[in-house]
Image (cartoon, rainbow, N blue to C red):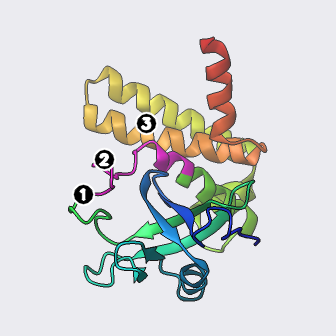
Amino acid sequence: MNINFDKLGNGLVPAVIQDNTTNKVLMLGFMNKEAFEKTEKEGKVTFYSRTKERLWTKGEESGNFLNVVSIAVDCDEDTLLIKVNPVGPVCHKGTDTCWNEVNKEDDLMFLKYLQDFIDKRKEEMPEGSYTTKLFTKGTRTITQKVGEEAIETVIGAMANDDENFLYEGADLLYHLTVLLTHKGYRLEDLARELKKRHK
């Protein structure tokens, strides 16, 4: 990775810190070569503090470390994007981000996690997994399950049984995701189709 620490004239490059799970931008700091190397080596974000004029590992006093997931440099090789798993609030004022935003995973993001999880099941096919069993039995069994869960979802809705409606609806969505994966598609393909229709 080539990083131009000389471009700004002070040996520093900006480092944008982003939550790996929520994609929320958490803070902005600066790194010199030594801070970058320490960050790479230890897996915890270390900045160069311009006020204290020394290296500063985020969380060294509070315990709210920024555990590194990935580091990328921009096209001009003078700005870093560091994806992290934060431990606790990021801002020194006690807020989740330095822009006073709540850093919470959107529940819809779980659908992406579920899709990735099902993709991994299809790739690895671990023994004892219900999802593996479905993939092994093939299209007929999976489509049958989608049909069954659709009917049970409708029954729950018609009976005004909200708890059962949501439970069966979740089963329907899971089995539909398995079917999509089995056919070589992902939930994103349905999202694209809906987006196309929305225009």
Q: Position of residue 84 (x, y in %)?
A: 49, 67
Q: Are marks 3 and 1 in contact (CB under 8 Å)?
A: no
Q: Residues within 10 Å of mark 2 (few under 14, many from 20)?
A: few
Disc 3 designates what residue?
Answer: 169
Q: Secondary structure at mark 3?
A: helix
Magenta residue span? 96-112
Q: Is residue 183 above or below residue 118?
A: above
Left or right, 52 with reference to 147: left
What residue type is disc 3 on? Gly
Disc 1 designates what residue?
Answer: 95
Q: Residues within 10 Å of mark 1 (few under 14, many from 20)?
A: some
Disc 2 designates what residue?
Answer: 101
Mark with earlier residue (3, 2): 2
Q: Secondary structure at mark 1?
A: loop
Mark with earlier residue (1, 2): 1
Q: Position of residue 116 (x, y in %)?
A: 62, 56
Q: Nearer the viewer, residue 139 or 100?
A: 100
What residue type is disc 2 on? Glu
Farthest residue toward the left? 93
Q: In the rendered structure, find residue 115 and report the number of the disc placed on it.
A: none
- Residue 87 position by quadrant: bottom left
Quarter containing the C terminus: top right
Query: Would residue 19 be seen by someone viewing this image from the given angle?
Result: no
